[in-house]
Amino acid sequence: MSTLTFVRHGQAGSRHVYDTLSPLGREQASRLGAYLATQDHPCDLFLTGALERQQQTAQLLHAGCPSLPPPTVLPAWNEFDLDAVYRSLAPQLAAVDPTFAAAYEQLRAESADPLNPVHRRWTAADIAVIHAWVDGRFPSEAETWEAFCHRIRQAFAALPDGHILISTSATPIALCVTFAIEAPNPFRFAGALLNSSLTTFRRHHGQPHLQTFNSTPHLPDPGWRTHR
């Protein structure tokens, strides 16, 4: 029997410098590393996506729990590139949808302020552009939704037997949940995932079984728990 444990990276930066951990994100990851050091948590292989926020999380876990093997970078566990999706689709969507155009302009104006709460929440513009990407409404230079899902499914299926720890992001974890329980909408799970949370599967006879979802035993203070 194998144990597959997924860690969502700690809180990232603002929208303009998202691919790095915020000070709180570093604290979340450090606390998780310290927690793992107190547990009987065998680990045969430690993987991380290639994004900075994923690798920084993995490095802080290893620093807090030196018994973990050094993390191995595997780009297959990268999150989809929301910036690339926006660059490709937002101008096309704005040209045909005045409601989106207004929401997009408001997002751009608000995000110019690094202290604006828009950096820590999803907006109507975000949801609309992701729906357009998933539905394939416009030509795009970004990775397609179908290609992204295939990449994560292949990475999940290719995990070897043993006790595996993976530092990745919300949507890859959510997709793995939907693969395991045959649920239709990964974004409902992705939206629930807390930064630095643990999601665990047991794999028996090649089949993954969800054991825990979105666990944060290392964050007892609600102020440490964030979604974005």
Image (cartoon, rainbow, N blue to C red):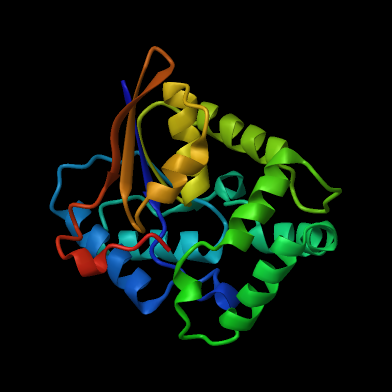
Q: Is residue 4 above or below residue 47?
A: above
Question: Residue 203, percent across and down?
Answer: 36, 22
Q: Residue 174: x, y in percent?
A: 46, 40
For the N terminus, the quadrant is: top left
Residue 111 sits above or below residue 81 on the image: below
Q: In the rendered view, does 177 fall on the left or right side of 51? A: left
* Rendered residue at 41%/75% (across/down): 22
Q: Is residue 110 left or right of residue 129?
A: left
Location of residue 154 (image quadrant): top right
Q: Is residue 78 visible?
A: yes
Residue 104, percent from left and from top: 68, 69
Asked if one can make out residue 65 in the rendered structure from this viewpoint, the answer is no
In-front residue for pair 183/44: 183
At 33% from the left edge and 63% from the top edge, which residue is drawn? Answer: 226
Q: Is residue 211 above or below residue 30?
A: above
Quadrant in which residue 158 is drawn: top right
Q: Is residue 53 above or below residue 133?
A: below
- The image quarter containing residue 164 is top left
Q: Nearer the viewer, residue 126 or 175?
A: 126
Does residue 148 appear left or right of residue 182 in this picture? right
Residue at position x 25%, y 63% in the image: 64
At 64% from the left edge and 59% from the top edge, which residue is drawn?
82
